[in-house]
């Protein structure tokens, strides 16, 4: 599904098809900025079935599970096993709506961009996971902070040792 916004941020429509720039200009004038359509590359599988069970952040999680990469994207995993950690970009698919100002876990009142809340204008999450092993199209991981069934948009290698050196 594609959400379309005016430059003001007002949501104007959700559509199931992709329009070209010319078609959008014709339909809604030049008040939109940009539309992107994302297709999940895989799905998270783990024991976390309820949102209440999910650790609030990957940095405090010890949960193990797997990421099943869809067969059509399997070749994109070539070489991923040489990395100890991966950055996983995912959709907060159970999140509904957003609040620009929220009460953070520590009780402070903050803007959504100063929190890790799933209640965001674009319900996209980022977690750094420990990569335990790779078998075929399955990534076995640790530090999950996602519910079972979470759609995965992208995976990137995370150079954990280089980051540690940089900040040591």
Image (cartoon, rainbow, N blue to C red):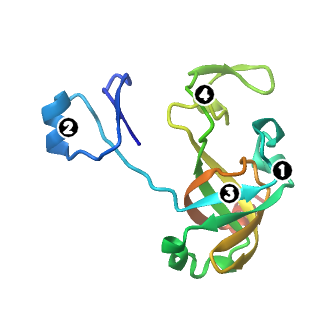
Of callouts 1 and 3, the N-terminal one: 3
Query: Dot 1 corresponds to which residue?
Result: 61
Query: Which label number is shown at residue 108?
Result: none
Of callouts 2 and 4, the N-terminal one: 2
Q: Is residue 111 visible?
A: yes
Q: Nearer the viewer, mark 4 or mark 1?
A: 1
The answer to whether marks 4 and 1 mark residues whose Cβ atoms lie closer than 8 Å is no
Query: Which label number is shown at residue 24?
Result: 2
Q: Residue drawn 72% across and 58% down?
A: 45
Residue furthest to the right: 62
The answer to whether marks 2 and 4 mark residues whose Cβ atoms lie closer than 8 Å is no
Query: Dot 3 corresponds to which residue?
Result: 44
Q: Nearer the viewer, residue 33 or 37?
A: 37
Q: Nearer the viewer, mark 4 or mark 3?
A: 3
Of callouts 2 and 1, the N-terminal one: 2
Q: Nearer the viewer, residue 96 or 36?
A: 96
Of callouts 2 and 3, the N-terminal one: 2
Query: Mark 1 packing: few (<14 Cα in 10 Å), some, or many (20+)?
Result: some
Q: Vertically, is 85 above or below 38?
A: below
Q: CA distance from mark 2 to mark 4?
A: 29 Å
Q: Is disc 3 placed on a helix, strand or loop?
A: strand
Query: Mark 4 packing: few (<14 Cα in 10 Å), some, or many (20+)?
Result: some
Of callouts 4 and 1, the N-terminal one: 1
């Amino acid at each position: 599904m594609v959400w379309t916004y005016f430059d003001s941020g007002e949501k104007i429509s959700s559509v199931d098809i992709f329009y070209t720039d010319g078609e959008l200009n014709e339909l809604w004038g030049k008040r939109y900025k940009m539309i992107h359509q994302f297709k999940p590359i895989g799905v998270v599988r783990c024991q976390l079935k309820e949102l209440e069970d999910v650790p609030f952040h990957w940095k405090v999680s010890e949960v193990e599970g797997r990421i099943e990469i869809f067969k059509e994207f399997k070749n994109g995993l070539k070489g991923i096993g040489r990395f100890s950690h991966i950055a996983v970009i995912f959709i907060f698919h159970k999140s509904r709506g957003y609040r620009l100002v929220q009460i953070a876990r520590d009780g402070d009142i903050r803007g959504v961009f100063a929190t890790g809340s799933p209640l965001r204008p674009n319900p996209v999450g980022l977690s750094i996971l420990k990569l335990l092993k790779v078998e075929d199209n399955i990534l076995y991981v640790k530090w999950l902070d996602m519910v079972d069934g979470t759609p995965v948009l992208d995976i990137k290698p995370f150079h954990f040792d280089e980051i540690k050196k940089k900040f040591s």
